[in-house]
C-alpha cells in the first residue's frame, strides 16, 4: 500500500532499560526480544555491550537466539566500544554496529570536551573501523548517530553526517536527544540536512526522539514526512527521563493515516497489546490509563452518545479497532479440566517456550488459579508465566511468610527467603502490615530497602481476580522496580518486594 517502507528500530532493551528502575535480567531481555521478533520490528537494539559484562552477554544471547530482526548494539565512537559491540553482535544473522558521538556545541564543550575537528576525526576513524569489522559478515551494517543533533549547527552536522556516509555507515540517525525539537521545525531540519548533505539520499535517515515536551511521536512523524525511513522508538514509550517515542503510537499513526504518509511499516499490529503488557510486567512500569493505543481506556467509550454510535457503526467514534492492536481474544481459554498438553499448546501459541521443569511449575500455578476461578484468561496465563521466566536467574526466592495484623495489635511478620541456595529467616514488628513484611525481608536478606512506590490492581475484573502489586524500592540510593501476582495481596506484595531485591542484586547492589 505505501510507497515507502519505514523501518521500526526498537530500543526498549537499550534506551528503554535506562529508565529509572526498569532493570531487566538476561532471561527477561531475551523474552522481550523474542516478542519483538513476533511483532516484526526491523531492528532490535539489544543493549550497550561495553557497559558491563552482563550487558555484553545479554546482547550476545539475543544475537545468537533471536531470529528475524537485525540485532544492533550501541557503541560510543571509541575503539574499545566498537570492538566490544562487534564481538557481541557478530553471531547474529543480521548484525549492526551503532556508533555515536555528540555534535552540539554544548555537548562537545562540556560533555565530551572535544573540538569540532576532533569530533569529525573520531567519526571518520570509528565509522571506518566499524565498517571494516562489518565486512567480516555478509549481512552486517553500520549505523551512525550524531548525539544531540537537534541542537547542533546544521552546517557542521551535515559535514559529520556526510563523513559517516563516506566511511561506510548506511543508516544515519538524527536524534533529538533531549526532547527539544518541535514538529514543524524538526521536519524542516531533516529537509535542510538532505539539502546540505546530498549523500543522505543514498542511505537510510533515522530519527530518535525523546518525549520531554510530549512531542516524541509528533517529531518522529514530521521527520517521516520529510524523508526519514527509520524511526527509533520503545514499547510503551519508556526510556530516559520522559521516555522515547512510543512504538505503538508511531506504528498506529502510520497505519491509520497511511494515505497521508504514503508509507507503511512491517509491524504485526495485532501483537502490540501483548508486547505492551509483557514490557510493562517485566520492567515494572505501569501504563497510564489514558495512554494512546495501549492504555486501559484507549478503546473505552463512556458517554451514551458515543456508545450508541459505536454499536451502530464502529467508525463513528473509532479510528482503529481494539482488534487492530490485538485486544480481542483475551478471554478464553482454559478451565480446571484443561491438562498439561492444553497449557503447553496455549503457551506456545502465546510465544512462550518453557523447559519441562518450568512447565511443571507453571502447571501447578495454573491448577491453583483454575481451582479458584472458572475461566483462566490469557492475562492470567501471562502473569503466571512471566514469573517462571524471571526465576531462571533469581538470587532470592520467597519460600514462606507469616503475617499477623489487626486493629489492636502491632503487625508482626516472619519470612523465609532462599538466598543464593541458603535459607535465611527474617522477622519484624512494624507499624503497617505491608511494611512489616518488607522489613522482615530486609532482615532476611541483610539490606535496608526504602519503599518509594506501592501499587495494587486487579489483573482482570471480578472478586476472584489475581492481584498484581508493583513496588519501587530504593537500595543504596538506586531505584528498582518489582512486580508480582497472587490471589493474596500480602503474598503478591512480598513477592514484588523480593523481585525488586533481585533486580538490585542483578545490578550488583545486594
Ligand atoms: Mn535516547
Image (spheres, helix red, strand yellow):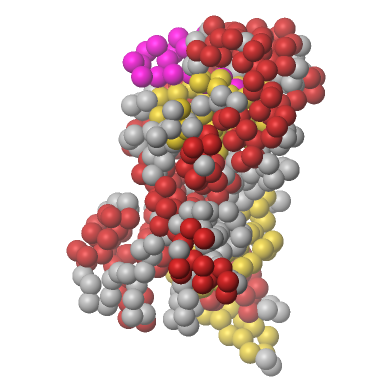
Q: Which residues are magenta?
A: 126-145
Q: What x and y, as percent, mark residue 321? A: 45, 57
In the image, 316 versus 53, the foreground residue is 316
Residue for point 56% across, 81% down: 403
Reply above or below: 208 against 466. Answer: above
Residue 405 percent across, percent down from the top left: 61, 86
Q: Quadrant of residue 312?
A: bottom left
32 relative position to 316: left or right: left
Q: Is residue 90 left or right of residue 293?
A: left
Residue 355 among magenta residues: no
Q: Quadrant of the N terminus?
A: top left
Residue at 44% over, 13% down: 133
Residue 145: x, y in percent?
Answer: 60, 22
181 and 131: which is toward the camera: 181
Q: Is residue 26 above or below residue 109?
A: below
In the image, what residue occupies the spot 64% across and 20% down?
191
Q: Position of residue 60 (x, y in %)?
A: 41, 32
Amino acid at each position: 500500500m505505501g510507497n515507502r517502507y519505514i523501518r521500526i528500530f526498537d530500543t526498549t532493551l537499550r534506551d528503554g532499560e535506562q529508565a529509572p528502575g526498569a532493570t531487566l535480567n538476561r532471561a527477561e531481555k531475551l523474552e522481550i526480544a523474542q516478542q519483538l521478533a513476533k511483532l516484526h520490528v526491523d531492528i532490535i537494539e539489544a543493549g550497550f555491550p561495553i557497559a558491563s559484562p552482563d550487558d555484553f552477554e545479554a546482547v550476545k544471547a539475543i544475537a545468537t537466539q533471536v531470529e528475524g530482526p537485525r540485532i544492533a548494539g550501541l557503541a560510543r565512537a571509541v575503539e574499545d566500544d566498537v570492538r566490544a559491540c562487534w564481538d557481541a553482535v557478530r553471531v547474529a544473522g543480521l548484525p549492526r554496529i551503532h556508533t555515536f558521538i555528540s555534535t552540539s556545541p554544548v555537548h562537545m564543550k562540556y560533555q565530551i570536551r572535544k573540538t569540532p575537528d576532533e569530533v569529525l576525526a573520531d567519526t571518520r576513524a570509528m565509522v571506518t573501523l566499524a565498517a571494516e569489522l562489518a565486512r567480516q559478515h555478509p549481512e552486517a551494517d553500520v549505523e551512525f548517530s550524531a548525539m544531540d543533533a537537534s541542537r547542533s549547527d546544521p552546517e557542521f552536522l551535515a559535514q559529520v553526517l556526510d563523513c559517516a556516509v563516506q566511511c561506510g555507515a548506511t543508516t544515519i540517525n538524527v536524534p533529538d536527544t533531549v526532547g527539544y525539537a518541535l514538529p514543524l521545525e524538526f521536519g524542516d531540519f531533516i529537509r535542510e540536512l538532505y539539502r546540505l548533505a546530498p549523500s543522505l539520499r543514498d542511505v537510510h535517515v533515522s530519527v530518535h526522539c525523546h518525549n520531554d515536551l510530549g512531542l516524541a511521536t509528533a517529531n518522529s512523524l514530521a521527520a517521516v514526512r520529510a524523508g526519514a525511513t527509520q524511526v527509533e522508538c520503545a514499547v510503551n514509550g519508556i526510556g530516559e527521563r520522559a521516555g522515547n517515542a512510543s512504538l505503538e503510537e508511531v506504528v498506529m499513526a502510520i497505519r491509520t493515516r497511511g494515505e497521508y504518509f504514503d508509507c507503511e511499516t512491517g509491524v504485526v499490529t495485532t501483537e502490540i497489546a501483548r508486547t505492551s503488557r509483557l514490557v510493562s510486567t517485566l520492567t515494572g512500569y505501569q501504563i497510564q490509563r489514558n495512554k494512546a493505543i495501549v492504555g486501559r481506556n484507549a478503546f473505552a467509550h463512556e458517554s451514551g452518545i458515543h456508545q450508541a454510535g459505536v454499536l451502530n457503526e464502529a467508525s463513528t467514534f473509532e479510528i482503529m479497532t481494539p482488534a487492530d492492536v490485538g485486544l480481542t481474544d483475551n478471554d478464553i481459554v482454559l478451565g480446571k479440566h484443561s491438562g498439561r498438553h492444553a497449557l503447553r499448546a496455549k503457551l506456545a501459541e502465546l510465544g512462550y517456550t518453557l523447559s519441562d521443569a518450568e512447565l511443571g511449575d507453571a502447571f501447578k500455578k495454573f491448577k491453583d488459579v483454575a481451582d479458584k476461578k472458572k475461566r483462566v484468561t490469557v492475562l492470567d496465563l501471562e502473569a503466571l508465566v512471566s514469573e517462571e521466566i524471571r526465576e531462571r536467574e533469581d538470587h532470592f526466592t520467597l519460600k514462606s511468610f507469616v503475617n499477623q495484623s489487626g486493629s489492636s495489635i502491632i503487625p508482626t511478620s516472619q519470612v523465609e527467603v532462599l538466598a543464593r541456595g541458603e535459607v535465611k529467616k527474617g522477622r519484624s514488628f512494624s507499624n503497617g502490615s505491608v511494611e512489616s513484611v518488607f522489613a522482615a525481608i530486609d532482615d532476611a536478606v541483610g539490606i535496608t530497602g526504602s519503599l518509594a512506590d506501592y501499587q495494587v490492581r486487579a489483573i482482570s475484573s471480578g472478586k476472584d481476580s489475581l492481584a498484581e502489586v508493583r513496588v519501587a524500592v530504593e537500595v543504596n540510593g538506586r531505584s528498582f522496580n518489582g512486580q508480582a501476582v497472587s490471589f493474596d495481596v500480602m503474598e503478591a506484595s512480598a513477592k514484588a518486594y523480593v523481585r525488586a531485591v533481585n533486580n538490585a542484586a542483578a545490578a550488583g547492589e545486594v
